[in-house]
Image (cartoon, grey):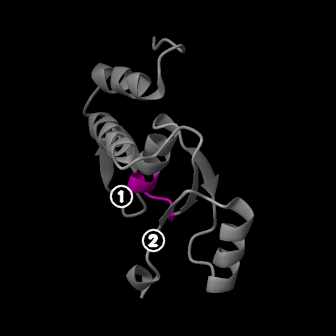
Amino acid sequence: MIAHDLALLDRLDAIAATEPDRAAIIDAGGGTVSRARVAQRTRAMAAGFTAAGLQPGNRVLFAVRPCATALSLMTAIVEAGGVLVAAQPGVGDSLFESQMRLVQPRWVVAESALSRR
């Protein structure tokens, strides 16, 4: 049983410790990511956001298609104290600019339009 009063990353670590090799995520192509790998990646990303200057309460506009990396990124942003603002990835420039004006994020995590071509 995992205690519910632990910090988010501590809970991920505790879950990973019970069955580290068990699949935590199965992607669209059928590939799996283990519980241990999700915990490791998320902890490293959270540390990276903090080291890069993400402050508690900073809004982070997040426009990344669903995947294992997106899950780790979202969790890392929350763990680092950011406020996650979900946005539709792949929208046109004018809609993205509207989202930026509305949200006024301190940070943006988005996929490059070039990566989809």
Q: Nearer the viewer, residue 94 or 38?
A: 94
Q: Quadrant of residue 98?
A: bottom right
- Residue 102 seen by the camera: yes
Q: Which residues are magenta?
A: 64-70
Q: Nearer the viewer, residue 100 or 16?
A: 100
Q: Earlier in the sequence, mark 1 or mark 2?
A: 1
> Could you tell me residue 27's position as x and y percent?
40, 56
Q: Quadrant of residue 115?
A: bottom left
In this image, 90 relative to 52: left or right?
A: right
Q: Label 1 sits on what residue type? A: Gly
Question: Which element type, helix, strand or loop, lies under badge 2?
Answer: loop
The residue drawn where x is 52% and y is 39% is 78
Q: Quadrant of the N terminus?
A: top left
Residue beneath disc 2: 111
Residue beneath disc 1: 30
> Could you tell me residue 29's position as x and y percent?
37, 64
Q: Label 2 sits on what residue type? A: Glu
Q: Are there few (<14), some (14-19), or many (20+) residues within 10 Å of tag 2?
A: some
Q: Quadrant of the C terminus?
A: bottom left
The residue drawn where x is 59% and y is 40% is 57
In this image, 113 relative to 95: left or right?
A: left
> Is 66 contained in the magenta span?
yes
